[in-house]
Image (cartoon, coloured by chain):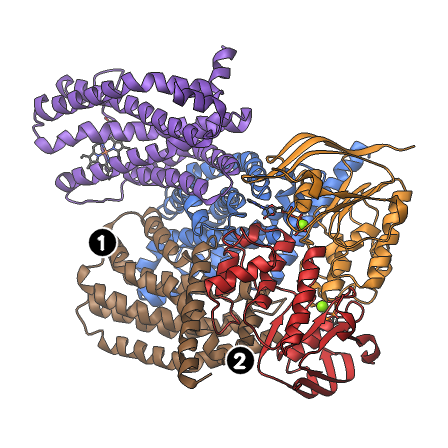
Chain colours: A orange, B red, C purple, D blue, E brown
Amino acid sequence: MTATLLEVRDLDVYKGPRQLLTGLNLTVTTGSLLQLAGGNGVGKTSLLRAFAGLARIEVFGHLSRCDDVLYSGHAPALKGTMSPRQNLRTHPAGLCSPSDSELDKALAALNMTGYEDALTARLSAGQQRRVALARLFLPSARLWLLDEPFTALDVAGVRVLENRFREHADDGGAVIFTSHQKADLGERLEVLDLESYRGP
Amino acid sequence: MTATLLEVRDLDVYKGPRQLLTGLNLTVTTGSLLQLAGGNGVGKTSLLRAFAGLARIEVFGHLSRCDDVLYSGHAPALKGTMSPRQNLRTHPAGLCSPSDSELDKALAALNMTGYEDALTARLSAGQQRRVALARLFLPSARLWLLDEPFTALDVAGVRVLENRFREHADDGGAVIFTSHQKADLGERLEVLDLESYRGP
Amino acid sequence: MWRIVHQFGSPPWVYRFCDRVIPWLLPLTVVALLVGSAWGLLFAPTDYKQGDSYRIIYIHVPASVVALAGYYVMASAGLVSLVWRVKLADTAMRAAAPIGAAYTAIALVTGAIWGKPTWGAWWVWDARITSMLILFFLYVGVMALFEAYENKTIAARACAILSLVGTVNIPIIYKSVDWWYSLHQPASIKFTGSSAIDTSMLYPLLGMIVTFYVLFALLMMLNIKQSLTQEYAHSAWLHKRLND
Amino acid sequence: MAPERADASLAHYCIRQTGRHLLLLVRSPGEIVNPLLFFLLVIILFPLGLGPDPEMLSALAPGIVWVVALLANVMLCMRLFADDFADGSLEQLAMANIPLAVAVLPQLLASWLASGFLLSLVSPLFGLMLGLPLSVAPILMASLLMGTLIMLLLGAVGAALTVGIQRGGMLLSLLILPLYVPVLIVGTRSLTEAVGGGDPAVALALLGAGVTGGLVLSPVAIAAGLRVSLEL
Amino acid sequence: MAPERADASLAHYCIRQTGRHLLLLVRSPGEIVNPLLFFLLVIILFPLGLGPDPEMLSALAPGIVWVVALLANVMLCMRLFADDFADGSLEQLAMANIPLAVAVLPQLLASWLASGFLLSLVSPLFGLMLGLPLSVAPILMASLLMGTLIMLLLGAVGAALTVGIQRGGMLLSLLILPLYVPVLIVGTRSLTEAVGGGDPAVALALLGAGVTGGLVLSPVAIAAGLRVSLEL
Ligand code: HEM
Ligand SMILES: Nc1ncnc2c1ncn2[C@@H]1O[C@H](COP(=O)(O)OP(=O)(O)OP(=O)(O)O)[C@@H](O)[C@H]1O
Ligand SMILES: Nc1ncnc2c1ncn2[C@@H]1O[C@H](COP(=O)(O)OP(=O)(O)OP(=O)(O)O)[C@@H](O)[C@H]1O
Ligand SMILES: [Mg+2]
Ligand SMILES: [Mg+2]
């Protein structure tokens, strides 16, 4: 049985004086994998933030979504002075803290075993991205809003993440993500090209 | 006539207690396009920094290169409180300042016309990357060392950059860059997989 | 009642209102200002202690009083904009800030001019004077905050929050500074019991206070009208109005 | 989630976040210990600068202590939300399924513990060094405890409103300076009363009222300010 | 490039970089004008904290002015290289084809112009407000001009060494602090001499010697410190 996790009718998105997007309609149900596509600056990030509820003033139209959301933006909310474990355990969006074994399993899934207690600032770009993504391997929300999650990941990392997306959709979740690459997610993947909703 | 821009013999790269890379040999001549490949954390960034001369203490072996280098790392040295134009005009690595028309041409090449005087912090991720890359469209150095230049760019942006790489190689320059994607640079592209030089 | 509230939220209505009121309010204010100044400066009796220097009171006191009141005008507009999301309230709030700041500046400058002959110093660390300086900072803070945001919708919200925080604080600032040290004149106009100044000086003073209030309102209207002209430059109703 | 479960996890969340911020403060170079460092500097430097006359120093001590506490607080507030805004932590905080006005409390608590609280704890020592009698130590501590908290709550509103602004240096201090004045006056008053043998109770009571009022009102204002800044 | 061409472009480069840093300082919220702001705050707050007695204020003025200048400098140095390090500007600076010891000079100059220099320029005004006689204004300005420069040069060495450290910066800044003390002592000495009718020439000469020494030695130390930090 599918439930609606996000619904959008006639949405307009503004940034300052500019209207980025206009007349967007969208329904995301459990099991969906939705990629927001479009050129640089078309408004993918702005839209995703609107979905997350982080942009209320500049969005007009009907927008309703479930409460159970995980948002991960361009900035990964990682603190360089803490270890990956500390970062994940005290993540500001996490009302419930994961247990140590959950944490280790999540980091292991992303091939970060051995770096649990390293200094995050000393990790490589891709490793930092992996730490940020480890949240997806912890017990988490149903609707994921991910802004360019594949950035900085190597090929193996992209594979792992794609598998996780599929798994999450199978478990009754949904993923909305932006990416400039074509994700290998089978026919389940819907691609929404924002170019066709560009504002005037 | 080709000249050697970078030469490396038996190079070992360390990070703290860990030996990342060992026994690296490499010659880069004018006209080369070299992609450093390998999984997250293998040491691409560290190696590139060594090439740039930013890591002298932890690098052992013979390393010689020409003086005329442009390095662009993970952090793009952009100031959010300044405009793209101001950022480029006062770039800390630029001994000579580009003229206004050069600047506008460079930004235009990356499809950033109209954003020359915007606030850089308000640009989208890909637009910021384009501002950082605009240095490549200004009169610049012969040897480019670029750390994941394709990140955050849309498909059109990647194309533009690839063309610029080829052009630069044709003009007697050379590019060493890291990327997790396969770049579309024809047979001129050499790929150096660092996995085979992993330290013990 | 609700219709009135509603009308005040409608830019065309307010624009028309300003358009109608300004033409007769403007001459009235100018006349009142002239008459008040003439009365105060020429016909009111000379003070036996301070001589003629006291005459600056006719500018100093009204400016001071209205400067204070202006803050509450601004903050109320902020509250309305924040709670009821009335866009016009933003405009009103933005209009009030520079006017209030100007009044405060006038109070400070006239006070300083007055202080030189009376206390022998341009500036003393006195309670009311200090708190007036602080009020000036509050106004300027709101203005600077508004300028600092590029996005004016967001700027208005920020300013509304700030001015509300300021509202809570103004009485506190006043009380605390009073408690700290006071050299300045205590309040001498009292509505219960007898005032400490003579009626021949008091009436022109009261007249000037009223005039300064009206001037404040007038300046607000002019400012609001101008903002509306800018903001709705491309809207149909404004074009129609301007063409009428 | 059953309600009591939710309450428990809310409490745990707040404790965890407080711990996070304390850790960050301790680890970030020169962020936290500023207030203490400030104090130390001033205590060492003022006598050097003013000449070591003990009489004069002790007369000035209340003012010096309070001005220093205030300056340290301004410094703290300038960077209060800056890093969290830049690295995305702030938007994640807004994504936590609890009101933002509650979610900011841990950071405020941590910042206060690392600055005002610490400062109050060591203040008797510094008071002694400046020649304040030991008998006023309790008043000194109590007034600083409350005063620094009020100042932090006020300053945080300004910080929340200005954190997203890209051009407009200096703004924050302009915004919060007027709000600090009453705290400074009442705070020093409590001390001068105590030193002069008067009754500091009124001043302390006023500070207490300020704390209560601040705790009730300012988180709401801070949350509203942060929401505004996140829109940018 | 012909040598004279290289010199010209080096000069242009330095001018451009100075401009860049000045712009950044002006625009970053609450970064720069701190010293000035500090001064202003203190000038307003000290009377509020200490009571408005003009006699006392003027006796304290030299000390207050210098302690404020020093505190402002400490604040400045704490974040001197932090942003440039985080956003990659510092490594780009190291990539410019000129010695790093030269390449850091524009930033130092800009920071000093925006802090010490500005502070010195307005110091007579603030001195007046604190009740210093107008006749000491030249001495006040001269001693502040030199003193703030020395302190900046010293503080920048500490900043360069600590900028890459992830846990426990602070420490090194504490090491730098003792070096500030002589500057403070000599600086206030010049003022108290001038106010008391004595001869401030010796003190000023000492400050001048400090400036010369600092300008020669500290850029090299700063560059070395930055190189170490960039390796991290
Ligand atoms: C910069 C200096 C000064 C400032 C900022 C200042 C500020 C103020 C303010 C805010 C008020 C209105 C108070 C209220 O509404 O209750 C006021 C009223 C008044 N001021 Fe001043 N003042 C200054 C200097 C002076 C001087 C030098 C004098 C003359 C000795 C003076 C005489 C008065 C008088 C007589 C009133 C009317 C008091 C009353 O009836 O309420 N002021 N001033
Ligand atoms: N100070 C240090 N001590 C120990 N290990 C370190 C230190 N600094 C970095 N490392 C490690 O060095 C390795 C190399 O990092 P580097 O940034 O060069 O990788 P990379 O190949 O660029 O990876 P990516 O593709 O993710 O950008 C990483 O595994 C990192 O954890
Ligand atoms: N305050 C602002 N005023 C005007 N325009 C703005 C403002 N903030 C952002 N923009 C513009 O809004 C557009 C949308 O940005 P957004 O980050 O949503 O793009 P994006 O689709 O995520 O791009 P990318 O692929 O580069 O990440 C950009 O063109 C940007 O320049
Ligand atoms: Mg984006
Ligand atoms: Mg890398």
Mark positioned earlier in the residue sequence (1 or 2): 1
What residue appears at the point 87 percent right and 50 percent down from the top-left corner? A185
Q: Nearer the viewer, mark 1 or mark 2?
A: 2
Task: Locate the C terminus of chain E and report the quarter of the image it occupies.
Answer: bottom right
Q: CA distance from mark 1 to mark 2?
A: 48 Å
Residue E137 at what x, y percent from top left? 22, 63
**Which residue is nearer to you in this view: D192 or A168?**
A168
Q: Nearer the viewer, residue E39 or E93?
A: E93
Q: Residue furthest top?
A: C1
Q: Amino acid at mark 2?
A: Ala
Q: Dividing the picture into quarters, in which one does residue C101 lie?
A: top left
Q: Nearer the viewer, residue B15 or C224?
A: C224
**Where in the figure is residue B173, as x and y percent of width and height?**
63, 77
* Element on which disc 1 rests: helix
**Going 53% across and 57% down the picture, which residue do you hit?**
B84
Q: Circle 2 sits on which residue? A: E224
**Left or right of residue D53: residue A110:** right
Residue that appears at 73% across and 80% down: B14
* Labelled disc at residue A119: none
Kind of element beneath mark 2: helix
Q: Which residue is mark 1?
A: E55
Mark 2, chain letter? E
- Residue type marked 1: Glu
The subunit carrying tag 1 is: E
